[in-house]
Amino acid sequence: MHESGTYVQMTLPNTASKRSRGTTKVPATASATVLPDIKPHTPTTRLNREKHRSSTLVFPVEDVAPLVGMAPTFVRKATGQGTLLIVDHVLDLLDMDAFAETFVPRSMVIDYLVERASGVDHSDHVVPNPTTFDVRTGHAIDLLRSVPASTVQCLVTSTPYWGMRVYDESYEATWADGEVCAYGHEQTPEGFLRHTAEVLHAAARVVTDDGSIWWNVMDTFNTRTQIRASAVEALRAMEGKDSKKWADHVARRYSAGHSYLNDGEQVLIPSRIAERASRMGLYVKSVITWAKRSSLPEPQNSRVSRNLEYVLHLSKQRTPKFSRAGYHDTTPELGGRNNGWETEKLSDVWTLSTSSGGDGHGAQFPTALPGRCIALTTEPGDLVVDPFVGSGNSGVAARGHGCAFLGFDVSQQYVATAKEKIAKAPTPPKPDATAQQSRDR
Ligand SMILES: C[S@@+](CC[C@H](N)C(=O)[O-])C[C@H]1O[C@@H](n2cnc3c(N)ncnc32)[C@H](O)[C@@H]1O
């Protein structure tokens, strides 16, 4: 995948490509913490076909493919073009599969391509990758753009889930679909899927050809509910210990007004993310069930309780770097087989305890989870990145496996916690030190 600047610019038409927002009235900004009531409106206009017809810009097939949600091979076959496409080709592709958006709504794809082609630099200055570890504060997409392309062997992360948590500090990002909101606080699940696809697009650029992306995500029920800061708060509420009224909660999730999801229905977010990743050219290698050893009680009597989360394993090629030995040779704390609960065979069901919490972060994964992903798909010295690093457990796991690590989070407080925690993480002895020790014996 390419960054801006890779488009071939023959001549530039009028590039003042402000996205047209149409006549539908949309809120200027969405609050970072309040999810607005779902209304059947759209922030996008219909595709303005005439706007770019006279454009002489051409776009590489590889850059268009993830935007139209098709494989480069299919794009070549469908357009009869080997490497470069003109606007008319892109319009033809959009017409072929009119609703299959990835992260840019169909009506905005040409504008997006033209804006990128016109040399608008969305990237910050490039930061060198660390040889030990580094944790930076900022929006995941901005910071991913500052990472050199194809340098990350393993990207492992747990993003904010849709409409589930209020974090201590939030950041209102401006997304490619025009929405302005904190990640996870989208008005609809569809908004969350687009934004997730946008982060994945930025993530894929930095991953090496044989690298892996591991994406931990939970599903959400389409229900009207208050959104709290932690599982402990949610539990207190279930026990009737929350004295706050509905309106007192700064963050609330609404379900009414969605075009097809009923109130109380499971949204199926993980599988929809997997589908978009596939549309953007990534291989969906596995959809792993993380069977948790414990989970919160759920106050309902019409369905079974949930005891699982999902981990998507995505790659850029069919055979990423992968070694099952990591499952057998690693301690359980760093992701090895959880004896007594897991079988000899490494399967797509992982039975791991939840994090014991602490560090003031209410949504941590256990170190063993990123630890296993790293054990299976890296070697010592490789670079691991977590763009939503939270309290730093992925960094602890990466250092434990002898990898370099780069973490991002919008919260200064979490970044400080993560830095402190990762600095204290045990690292394996250097190979030459081990050899020296055995010679000394
Ligand atoms: C599920 S938590 C990650 C927890 C982490 N895996 C751990 O074990 O502590 C998601 C994190 O994403 C951060 N976050 C939310 N929006 C972000 C954004 N746009 N860019 C970077 N980080 C963001 C939150 O502050 C939160 O710490």
Image (tube, helix red, strand yellow):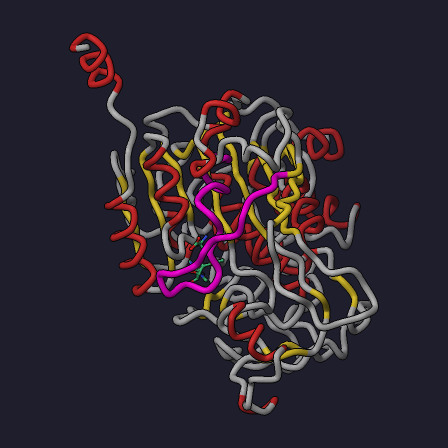
> Residue 143: where, in percent of width, then height?
37, 51
Q: Residue furthest left?
A: 440
46 or 165: which is nearer to us?
Answer: 165
Q: Residue furthest front?
A: 340
> Residue 309: where, in percent of width, then height?
63, 51
Q: Which quadrant holds residue 278? A: top right
Residue 146 vs 240, above or below: the answer is above
Res. 121 in view? no
Report the residue at 61% width, 58% height from top.
295
242 or 181: which is nearer to us?
Answer: 242
The verdict on residue 368 being magenta is: yes
Q: Main secondary structure of the magenta part?
A: loop
> Residue 336: where, in percent of width, then height?
49, 31
Res. 425 in view? yes
The verdict on residue 23 being magenta is: no
Q: Which residues are magenta?
A: 350-374
> Residue 156: where, in percent of width, then height?
48, 42
Report the residue at 63% width, 33% height from top.
283
248 or 296: which is nearer to us?
Answer: 296
The quadrant where ligand 1 appears is bottom left
Residue 166 vs 365, above or below: the answer is below
Report the residue at 48% width, 60% height from top.
363
Report the residue at 25% width, 34% height from top.
131
Q: Is residue 314 left or right of residue 38?
A: left
